[in-house]
Amino acid sequence: MSGADKYVYQSGFGNHFASEALPGALPVGQNSPQVCPYGLYAEQLSGTAFTVARHANQRTWFYRIHPSVVHRPFAPYNQDGHGIIGTFDARTTEPTPTQIRWLPFAIPEDQQVDFVDGLRTIGGAGDTALKNGLAVHIYAATTSMNQRAFSNSDGDLLIVPQQGRLDITTEFGPLMVAPNEIAVVQRGIRFSVALPDGPSRGYVLEVFDGHFELPDLGPIGANGLANPRDFQTPTAKYEHTNDKWSIINKYQGELFIAIQEHSPYDVVAWHGNYAPYKYDLANFVVVNSVSFDHIDPSIFTVLTCKSAHPGTAVADFVIFPPRFEVQQHTFRPPYFHRNCMSEFMGLIRGEYEAKKGGFLPGGASLHSMMTPHGPDAHTVEHATTRDLMPGRVADNTQSFMFESMFQLRLTKWATDNKQRDHDYFKAWQSIPITFNPSQR
């Protein structure tokens, strides 16, 4: 990976942004004038229903060369069978309470596969048609999207690159997203992915209802975790071409394609609060115990998509970043656990502190609801015999977790994948019995 980010951004989370690529392209004082500046067309993109409470209402106004409706009818898209699903039932998936780990997912180096064709669903819950649930995908791509744009009618996408930068063109402008950064592209936004560093791999979290937001800080106060000013949103940049473009739309878990004779990225100006963004995980402000005990991992939440049940998430995006550890009289690794939430973990780089060796960058693990999990035997031995001096943990490492209130069902592609580590259960088998009823 090489090269700096060449794009200009607007800072903030959930702001009402305004951006124009030509001076005066934004109408003054109204959203939809009879004739827009420069002969542009006004078009609204609604991310929430019109009547959602004002503090939660999300929408953007585009000022574009062509209305986005100028395209031919959609037809089913079947590039030798795509790997995405949108309904998680007995016909398409299977449940398992077994702890599962995958070695790094393979990149098809001998094939020309772009971001869309490289998407594979690992698992999920719910139904896109009912706007209820979530999906976990991986992508493994070897080529850029050429004259092709993708949009997702089913939900918002949180994209986590693990290998190679993603140069993402959107209707709002471009985003350069490197490993250890994330991008969120919301429902309905058209985007294309180029690969400036060659073959790329990463993870995708999709939520079918609601949008990602910053977690409440409670007694932490006004500052900490992911600060709003560190999120970056594109600035307007437009193309005016008569080239043939393919628009690929994910709708109810299926892919459809429409052809049009102009670039979908012909937005000259826009304003609103429904816009894609990126975030550098290195900017996360870590909170942790400075006395004793291991604090619950919720303190590492970057973004959350809330459910109708207060304090419970459709999905949380949680990271385990480099930090100091100073707890005394404490078993410092993540504790043994059975959780009422599902935990899907991935590793961007380095070694995860609780399972060094078997959990590799580009791989993943799933600990299903109420399935026991925790540090492996080697980690337990070290944690119970080490000197508890203040020190660093997870330097040059970035692991993350997609945590959800839903029970995940897995696709056949995931359960039968040749990268599945069928010996994962052995990580705990040699944990010794140290119980002695005669000694406290």
Image: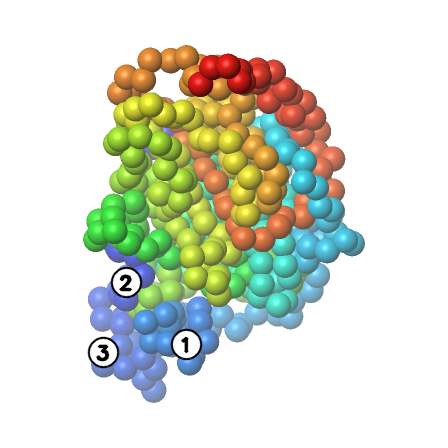
What residue sits 43% from the left and 62% below the top? 310
Q: CA distance from mark 3 to mark 1?
A: 25 Å
Residue that badge 3 annotates: 28
The residue mark sitting in front, 2 or 3, is 2
Q: What's the residue type where badge 3 is placed?
A: Val
Residue that badge 1 annotates: 52
Q: Give the answer, above or below, for where 389 lies relative to 246.
A: above
Mark drawn on residue 15: 2
The kind of secondary structure element at disc 1 is: loop
Indicate the quadrant containing the N terminus: top left, top right, bottom left or bottom right: top left
Disc 2 packing (10 Å; few <14; some 14–19; many ≥20): some
The residue mark sitting in front, 2 or 1, is 1
The kind of secondary structure element at disc 2 is: loop
Left or right: where 168 falls relative to 404:
left
The residue mark sitting in front, 3 or 1, is 1
- For residue 32, which quarter of the picture? bottom left
Q: CA distance from mark 2 to mark 3?
A: 19 Å
Q: Residue furthest right?
A: 91
Residue 53 horizontal/vertical position (percent): 37, 76
Left or right: where 221 falls relative to 340:
left
Q: What's the residue type where badge 1 is placed?
A: Val
Residue 223 horizontal/vertical position (percent): 22, 49
Q: Are marks 2 and 3 in contact (CB under 8 Å)?
A: no
- For residue 294, which quarter of the picture? top left
Point out the tag, 3 or 1, that comes first from the N-terminus: 3
Given residues 14 and 422, the one toward you in this image is 422
Q: Does the rendering let one see residue 120?
A: no
The kind of secondary structure element at disc 3 is: loop
Query: How many labels sit on residues?
Result: 3
